Image (cartoon, helix red, strand yellow):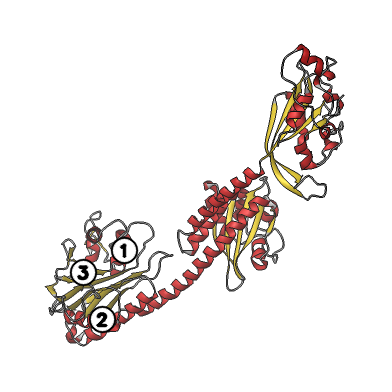
Amino acid sequence: MSEFGPSEDADNGGPGPQQRRRLNPLPAPAPAFSGRAVTRTAPHLLARPIGWAALIEVIEQMNEAVAVFSGPGHLLAYYNHALANLLGERPLEVSYGKAFPELQDWGPQLDRAWREGGAVYVPGMPLEVRQDPTAASPMEQRAFDVSFTRLTDKAGSAWGVLVLARDITAARVATERAQRAALIARIATELSRSLDLEETGRSVTRVGADLLGGCSVVDLWEPNSSLKRLAGSHKEARLQPVLEELLSFPRVTGGGPNEESIAYRVARTGRPATGTFDVEELARSSAGRRHAAIIRRLRPGPYLVVPLLVGARRLGALSVIRSTGAPAYTPRERALLDELADRASLALAHARDFDEQRTAALAFQRNLLPTDLRPIPGLEIVARYSAAARGSEVGGDWYDVLELPRGGTGLVIGDVEGHDVAAAALMGQVRSVVRAFAQEGHSPAQVAERVDRFLHKSGATRLVTMLYLQLFPKTRLLTSVRVGHPPALMIAPGERARELPGPTGPPFGVHDGEGVAGSRPPWREGSARLPEGATLALFTDGLVEEPGSNLDEGLGRLARTLDELSELISGRPVRDGANPGRTKPRVSLEKVADLAITNTLPPGDRRDDLALLLVRLT
């Protein structure tokens, strides 16, 4: 034996190296492995007739951790320097459980490889290892792809198992970072879709359920220190209606009637909670049989609840819940939920602030509109105002009905550019100015000229449209002016809906208030005598303009709707074709207004406010 250990030929009882060089002109064998490797190799392994000395020399140069176990008891016969650096020095020729007590997960895999042959591959096995080879080095958890391969002799008989562990921590970290970046991008995309509070809550719960399985629920903290269920989503579409029904019932805790729910405690304290629900305990504290049946169908099991916070501002709680029997939430999943909660908190805070601001702005706008239309002899008048879908900003739509000198009635409808409180404020100014000039007895064109000068001198920069009509019910004479606004539609008994004739001019804000190059103001009047029983429909563009369509398409759609409602609009009893000799009852203009809006607008959320004024000659 040399100072570096025995050579392969000496192990086999054959000629030494010098003699072999004389007999066989082949290259010299690899250098004998180091003395440190000897201390990590059992002698019986070196005695095996398959050249382990040379093989170990190669293995010692590998970065992967390698160990050899011999016999059915899996006695440690060898481990390389890479494994020693990770786990430290270990005793040889003892079972794997004594040599590596921290590697209990290896036992079943060693047994399987020994019993079945071939290779057993286990990806991503967690392992606590040292940060560097020193004994005092702190431990850290890493992930390894581990293979277990049965070793056989020339006769095919099993004599050991070789284990190779490749550290994939860096690759996994890179993958998780990429997944985290994709998650953040997805969360950002989902939460940027709307400023509507409820839609934001639904987006949060959809992401939570998709990422972590089961269902997800967002609860909002209310000013009175109560908790309001905002939204809930289930990963399984078939269970979504069941979850929504569950959320309509009172909360259950499985404890006494005065015990606070987990979500409430998390929202109140700002501390997360995790655990597992007992289905039967929850069912016993339910509000009745139906409530208990829903709980048993959803089978809530492992849960994880985290607070929704922005600084010191308490917003509520975000919960994820899996079905009974599902695995508990891991630290990695907790980190994902924390990421979602952080971003959801900001989105919900913005949506809640916007919702409160919009509610105040809508109240402000509604206060600027007529709250009660006074009866006018010879006319039946109905008005409708509808704000855009939640999540949109307040608009500047407006209408008014005015009592004029000499028995006339002023009908006005308009729209201010923009969707904010400033638009609503300017709308209030314009409405007041129109009312003042109209009630002084000015003609429609004169009212338009004076309003335009007022806006020019006040420094207003927004475009404003208006349709103003002077109607004398007794004579049915009508004079009108259009200031960049959609035309009114007229429905006469027995006729199809048609546009009220008359010229149109530009919106306020386009004309300079002093005439163009010395020309007279651009608004001219139209006049007509209405048929008996005629109905006028005045409206803003929110009723006839939709994304992807133009004004003419919208006007045609409204005209067709009014044609279909013509019998109702006439206000007269109509013979019932199914029952000869009978007549259908008179339908109120209120019902007609609702049907006109419902039947004209396509389904889905609207992006603009609308106003509608129906005026019927009686």
Q: Nearer the viewer, residue 467 or 547?
A: 547
Q: CA distance from mark 3 to mark 2?
A: 35 Å
Between marks 1 and 2 in the image, the one whose residue lies nearer the viewer: 2
Q: Nearer the viewer, residue 316 or 72?
A: 72
Q: Nearer the viewer, residue 19 or 493?
A: 19
Relative image position of residue 358 (x, y in whole percent) = 44, 71
N-terminal-most mark, 1 or 2: 2
**Quarter that holds the N terminus:** top right
N-terminal-most mark, 3 or 1: 3
The answer to whether mark 1 and mark 2 are in CB contact below 8 A is no
How many other residues sit within 10 Å of disc 1, few (<14), some (14-19) or many (≥20)? some
Residue drawn at x 65%, y 50% as measured from the top left: 332
Residue assigned mark 3: 535
How many other residues sit within 10 Å of disc 3, few (<14), some (14-19) or many (≥20)? many
Between marks 3 and 2 in the image, the one whose residue lies nearer the viewer: 2
Total tally of numbered discs in the picture: 3
261 sits to left or right of 575: right
Residue assigned mark 2: 456
How many other residues sit within 10 Å of disc 2, few (<14), some (14-19) or many (≥20)? some
Residue assigned mark 1: 597
Answer with the quarter of the image where residue 606 lies. Answer: bottom left
